[in-house]
Image: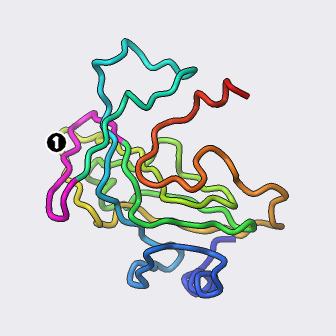
Amino acid sequence: MVLSDRTIREQLAAGRLVIEPFDDGLVQPSSVDVRVGSQFRVFNNSFRPYIDVRHPSDDLTELIEIGADEPFILHPGEFVLGTTLERVGIPDDLVARLEGKSSLGRLGLLIHSTAGYIDPGFRGTLTLELSNVSRLPISIYAAMPIGQISFLQMTTPVDRPYAGKYVDQTGPTASAFHREFDA
């Protein structure tokens, strides 16, 4: 069952669901708009001949921060990591889905490749996987609405809330897939 605007507000007021900073004007009938932050991770293609998923990838990206009125220009075919301005906290009986704004999708901006699912127990900012599939560059401004998050009620609370490698992340977070091989 997808939560309505009324239930989202009730969950926020009770402190079970967290969205900070919260702007009630971003609440939609069955979702809450999220805004893009000011930091982006841009890939540097000249350090390695390929991405080896068994090794940390921190040196593959460079952190860029834009000013309040300065655009970040995403070029055609480019892939960068971004972040939401909002920090979210999901209780152990809800899951969340992140989707792009359709108006931006109609311009060719995709906000995630695979990271649209947010587990029960997750806390932190959401890393955006930004791609430009159009033929023209797209400007992105800090604090502009970029996506929407919806919440789904689970049949029961989970036995084991998310406590993985991205819990409490802030800013655009590089892949930690290499940790899968350490286990």
Q: x and y percent of residue 5 in the render?
A: 54, 82
Q: Which quarter of the image is occupied by the N terminus?
A: bottom right
Residue 46 drawn in magenta: no
Disc 1 is placed on an element classified as: loop
Q: Where on the picture, by quarter, is residue 101? A: bottom left
Residue nearest the observer in this picture, 85 or 150:
85
The residue under the point 69% across, 69% down is: 91
In the figure, is residue 68 to the left or right of 34? left
The number of numbered badges drawn on the structure is: 1
**Residue at the farthest top position:** 49
Q: Magenta span has 78?
A: yes
Residue 43 place in picture, x, y as percent: 32, 31
What's drawn in magenta, residue-wise?
66-80
| Residues packed near mark 1 inside 10 Å, few (<14), some (14 to 19) or many (20 plus) | few
Q: Amino acid at mark 1?
A: Leu
Is residue 43 found left or right of 124 in the rendered image?
left
Q: Say which residue appears at 59% left-offset and 87% top-offset.
A: 13
x and y, in percent, of residue 159 in the image: 85, 58
Q: Which residue is mark 1?
A: 136
**Who's the residue at 41% across and 48% down the image?**
172
| Left or right, residue 68 beside residue 108 | left
Residue 174 placement (x, y as % from top left): 46, 38
Quadrant of the frame with the C terminus? top right
Label the magenta part by its dominant secondary structure: loop
Task: Please tell me which residue is depicted at 34% across the width and 41% down the height of the picture.
Answer: 41
The way the protein has been coloured in the rendering is rainbow
